[in-house]
Image (cartoon, rainbow, N blue to C red):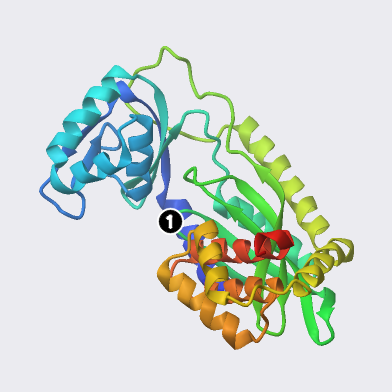
Amino acid sequence: MKSGRTLVELATELERQAKSKKDYIADTRRLSLRATPDASAPIIMDGVNGGMPLRQTAHQQLSATLQIPKPYYDRMLAQAPDLLARNANHWLQAQPAKKMIRTLDGGVRAILSDRFRPLDNLDLAETVLPKLTALGATVLSGDVTERRLYLKATTERVRGDVAKGDTVQAGLLVSNSEIGEGRLQVAALTYRLVCLNGAIMEQVTRRAHVGGRVGGDELIEDAREYFTDATRQANDKAFFMSVQDTVAGVLTQERLDKQLLTMRRAAGEQLPEDITEVLEVAAKRFSFTDGEKGSVLKHLIEGHDLSAFGLGNAITRASQDVESYDRATELEAIGGEVFQLPAKTWA
């Protein structure tokens, strides 16, 4: 399992971000883009806090909002930012809408619907971590990336064997995105003690960031800073309490026993002799890069287990070799999915 940040480092960063981030509600008719000669920030969005550069996800979301094909948007951003500004400004006026503009460290990090309901990472961590401690669980890995917050924990109290001497512990993943990159989710995972790999086995719950619209449709003023009202705070508190209950329901022997049955079945499914072809099938299905495919092959051979279980473990082990924590978590989920694939997948 990729290590990420320590709990102290994670808490420090979440607290820092909580102080730095601000949200605004803006009418697109009051927003505009302008090009700059700065290659590191070629586009500034005016109409929000005196003008702010756009971060990667904000560019992606603006492209989708204005229905400008992303390859063309990226080409303009790199080669003709003045042209991008003219195109975007036309459609910001022609397609009026209210947007939530989320900012952090002086930059626009997300451009979202005004119905987007912020569920903040710090609030989630402060809710979940005490519950994990009360359950006797230990956070083994965690990080906050540009896209998401991740907390991965396991408990020694709930364990079982796939085979004699091959023990796994029950665990869970809690994850959230403040910028619209997926829902808040709680997922069950297994932690294999032989190789210290984590496999994400199933989604337990997901919560969309959707709420009521903010303000009336007649409002077209400049961006207004957005504050969470008392009603929304109360609703969020009730929701986070339900997350605590979900966390407790994941770390049970009954749930782990079902996952063990799946892994035992996978351990009995031998892969075809042509391992290279198996890797080609897996790479195509799960969009592995050449580097990821080579890493999986290396760990599959070193693991001396040419079963579906061995392939899933090779994929979760390869997650430690990638630089991105986001991608590492995706690979852990792919490993768990491989355990659950029908035998005909490899035939």
Q: Is residue 169 above or below residue 94?
A: below
Q: Amino acid at mark 1?
A: Glu
Q: Say which quadrant the C terminus sits in.
A: bottom right
Mark 1 neighbour class, 10 Å CA radius: few under 14, some 14 to 19, many 20 or more? some
Q: Position of residue 68 (x, y in %)?
A: 30, 33
User: In the current view of this chain or complex, which residue is farthest to the top?
Assistant: 218
Residue 8: x %, y % from top left: 55, 72
Q: Quadrant of residue 77?
A: top left
Residue 11 visible in image: no
Left or right of 262? Residue 194 is: left
Q: Position of residue 105 (x, y in %)?
A: 35, 53
In the rendered picture of this protein, how many numbered marks are placed on residues? 1
Q: Residue furthest right?
A: 254
Foreground pick, 11 / 116: 116
Callout 1: SS: loop
Task: State the residue in front, 320 or 208.
Answer: 320
Above-or-below relation of 210 to 344: above
Q: Nearer the viewer, residue 292 or 159?
A: 292
**Is 20 left or right of 181, judged from the image as shown?**
left
Horizontal side, residue 70 vs residue 157: left or right: left
Q: Which residue is mark 1?
A: 146
Q: Say which of 142 and 330 sits in front.
A: 330
With respect to residue 191, does 15 lie above or below? above
Name the quadrant of the N terminus: bottom right
Whether 146 is drawn above or below 112: the answer is: below
Taking the spot 71% from the left edge, 85% from the top edge, the residue there is 194
Instruction: Tell me if residue 262 can be seen.
Output: yes
Residue in the picture at 74% in, 64% down: 132
Percent x, y of residue 190: 73, 69
